[in-house]
Image (tube, rainbow, N blue to C red):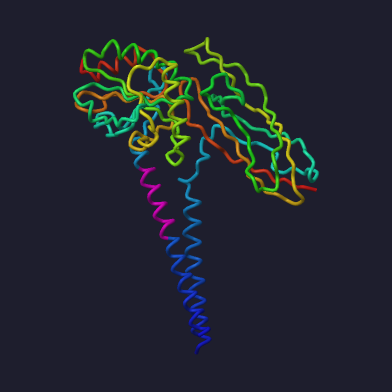
Amino acid sequence: MKRNTLVISIVLFILAVFAWAGWANWEYRKQAVERQLASVAHGVLVPDAAGGEAQYISPLKGKPAPEFALEDLSGKKVSLASYKGKAVLINFWATWCGPCKIETPWLIELRNQYAAQGFEVLGVSTDDIDHDDKQMMSSEKKDIAKSAQQLGIDYPVLIDGASVSTPYGGLDEMPTSFFVDRKGMVVAAQQGITSKEDIEANIKKALGE
Amino acid sequence: MRAVRIAGIQIATAVLLGAAALLAWGQVNDPAHSILKGAAVEYLFPEQVAVAVGKPSLVTLHFRVAPGLHINSHTPKDEFLIPTVFSIPDGTGVRLEEASYPVGTEFALPLDPTTKLSVYTGEFVIQARLVAEQGNHLVEAKLHFQACDKNVCMPPKTIPVAIDVIGK
């Protein structure tokens, strides 16, 4: 009897160890796949041959823009696919990002300038969203809305951009923008503030001009 | 015979446990897990401090911001900017009674010279008033900050601040 109890205990213990090892391995592999996906889409800064500012090169250029469906500030789901036929600037920003605030007025002006030609800006906030705490999530949404209002943003603002960071290369620096043509292909990408002229040139590429 | 069987079970258990431990160790120590590469802020010293038990003791903590980067001070000038905050988790045997932060340096981004930010660059210190219980406490304190350079910002980050606090 004593021996049976001992054997059963040992077997249960071994099974528990296997279960833990299996779970740890699954978690590890999941994270490794996410890291690999992010690294595949991760852009790099390449020094400018003429000695100017380094250029951001994204592996997504020439490829279909990764699809997403995110909530806007009113809670409505907005998908990238619903903008097919339009040129879209996907601007990943954050309320805590100073450089983002510098380029926002340029985006507002350029959006108004090119809207009639079928151009739209999607401002995707990468601020943390706490899905487990409804009260916190509500407060975070209010902060994003307040910041967007202070900046005078009149284009759609989507939240929880961090949830789509992997296919967009990890989004480890803000602002990061992707310029998508009418067919849904990425034609250019920018990281960090450059100039209104650079953004406009990429909008024209997206519009096919 | 019975003793041999039990010994066999014990050896098998030891082998399995060893394999599981190796598996876990391999995962934790995978270089890809390292998030310290290119850290924006580094904790410099002290690694160890001795303080009087139960009495608030002032400890000066030294940090360094990577060249070319700045982090918001403890009192940034915009409500949406993330302040630098030092903290000690509960249950470590050491309590943070108060932290005094340096005044930030005024800084403006080249493309927006009129907006003044309050930031830390290079080396900075935080004066922490610690209250320790008797004994040796390996405290993993935390520094929460958000770093930028002149063109981009990185997401907010929390780094560990390891201090061996000896309460005498």
Q: Residue at x 34, y 28 (%)?
A: A72
Nearest the viewer among A144 and A126 is A144
Taking A141 as reference, is B88 above or below it? below
Q: In the image, B67: left or right of A173?
A: right
Q: Is residue A31 magenta?
A: yes
Pick the residue in front: A110 or B151.
Answer: A110
The x, y position of residue A197, in whole percent, is 34, 12
| The quarter of the displayed image where residue A175 is located | top left
What x and y, as percent, mark residue B128?
71, 34
The magenta-colored residue range is A22-36
Residue B68 rendering spot, x and y as whole percentages: 54, 24
**Is B107 on the left or on the right of A114, as rendered?**
right
Q: Quadrant of residue A105 in the image?
A: top left
Pinpoint residue B117: horizontal percent, then vertical percent. Answer: 56, 18
Q: Residue at x 29, y 23 (%)?
A: A179
Q: Is residue A117 above or below residue A163?
A: above
Point out the residue furthest to the front here.
A135
Q: Main secondary structure of the magenta part?
A: helix
Query: Which quadrant holds residue B62?
Result: top right
Q: How many marks?
A: 0
Q: Is residue A118 magenta?
A: no
Write the residue at 23% across / 23% down: A181
